[in-house]
């Protein structure tokens, strides 16, 4: 079980600093929100009111946070009326947000090599986590990201080797490459230097390339669609390494009041229902998908 996490949830009115569109209606939104930025941790999210006229908020995973500068970033894709309204907001306008919310990823200090797997809108927490691990000198992360639509960030050919991964699969996220963090990309759509297939196939190849004695140093972290998380959990079970997953669920209140996002989990006391918004969104994989890791 991960330790409980109950930071105070701050309410802020933050200025939009920049709001950039990427292919397939993907957006990166940067908001000045010093209180949220000061305590945000990878895996947490903010609950954002898309317009002053719309009371229903939208939960967005935190992509990055800069405590010293006071801003937080979000990556999202337009999937409905709410996010379409948010996409129309302009720099200089004010957003109403609650955050950070939820239990974050909690790397175990004895596990100094981290495998991070992100799929689609599950990519943001992996970027945030990789940066924080590096900043805090907590280990050596490797990041695999998968998407069926164009990646919403700059890419580059990597010079950082990744064990088990073909040399032809060498396209990386520019930000990760600049930080010295190895990363590779996967997609079902054929692209040069990108693995054609599931991102979990990259994870399997990397784990298979590790010396058995080194598996005791590895911990897996994942965020993405439910089938991807289930596949990552199965991989972690197969290789005998701990795994933390961040769940994606529809949320109404986002602060634990409505219990509309509750999911069944295994606890030491037996089966229970837990709220993804505040009891998660991060859980140990075996709590959600069974097994004995």
Image (spheres, grey):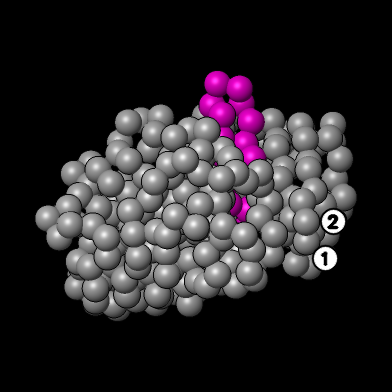
When the figure is inspected, residue 165 is found, relative to residue 140, above or below; the finding is below
Query: Is 141 displayed left or right of 33 in the figure?
Result: left
Residue 177, compared with residue 111, is above or below; it is: above
User: x and y percent of residue 257 in the render?
Assistant: 54, 62
65 to 157, vertically: above or below: above
Q: Which residues fall within the magenta stretch?
A: 59-74
- Give the residue furthest to the front: 168
**CB under 8 Å between discs 2 and 1:** yes
Look at 57% across and 57% down and name the residue there. 193
Residue at the spot of label 1:
81
Q: Nearer the viewer, residue 159 or 247?
A: 159
Determine the residue positioned at 23% across, 62% down: 241
Distance from the alpha carbon under mark 2 to that under mark 1: 6 Å
Circle 2 residue: 85
Residue 53 showing in the rendered view: yes
Q: Residue furthest top?
A: 68
Asked if the stretch drawn in magenta spans residue 109, the answer is no
Q: Nearer the viewer, residue 154 or 11?
A: 154
């Amino acid at each position: 079980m991960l330790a409980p996490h109950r930071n105070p949830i701050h309410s802020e009115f933050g200025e939009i600093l920049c709001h950039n569109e990427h292919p397939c209606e993907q957006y990166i939104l940067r908001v000045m929100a010093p209180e949220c930025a000061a305590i945000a941790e990878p895996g947490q999210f903010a609950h954002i009111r898309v317009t002053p006229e719309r009371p229903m908020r939208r939960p967005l995973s935190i992509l990055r946070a800069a405590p010293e500068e006071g801003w937080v970033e979000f990556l999202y894709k337009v999937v409905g009326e709410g996010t379409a309204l948010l996409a129309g907001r302009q720099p200089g306008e004010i957003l109403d947000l609650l955050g950070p919310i939820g239990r974050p990823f909690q790397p175990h200090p004895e596990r100094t090599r981290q495998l991070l797997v992100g799929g689609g809108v599950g990519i943001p927490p992996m970027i945030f986590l990789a940066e924080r691990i590096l900043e805090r000198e907590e280990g050596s992360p490797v990041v695999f990201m998968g998407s069926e639509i164009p990646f919403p960030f700059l890419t580059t050919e990597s010079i950082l080797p990744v064990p088990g991964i073909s040399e032809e699969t060498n396209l990386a996220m520019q930000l990760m490459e600049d930080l010295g963090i190895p990363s590779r990309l996967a997609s079902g759509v054929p692209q040069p230097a990108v693995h054609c297939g599931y991102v979990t196939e990259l994870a399997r190849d990397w784990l298979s390339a590790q010396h058995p004695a080194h598996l005791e140093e590895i911990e897996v972290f994942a965020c993405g669609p439910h089938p991807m998380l289930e596949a990552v959990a199965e991989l972690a079970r197969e290789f005998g390494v701990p795994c933390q997953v961040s769940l994606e669920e529809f949320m109404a209140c986002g602060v634990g009041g409505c219990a509309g996002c509750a999911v069944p989990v295994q606890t030491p006391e037996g089966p229970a229902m837990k709220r993804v918004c505040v009891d998660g969104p991060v859980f140990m994989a075996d709590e959600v998908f069974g097994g004995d890791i």
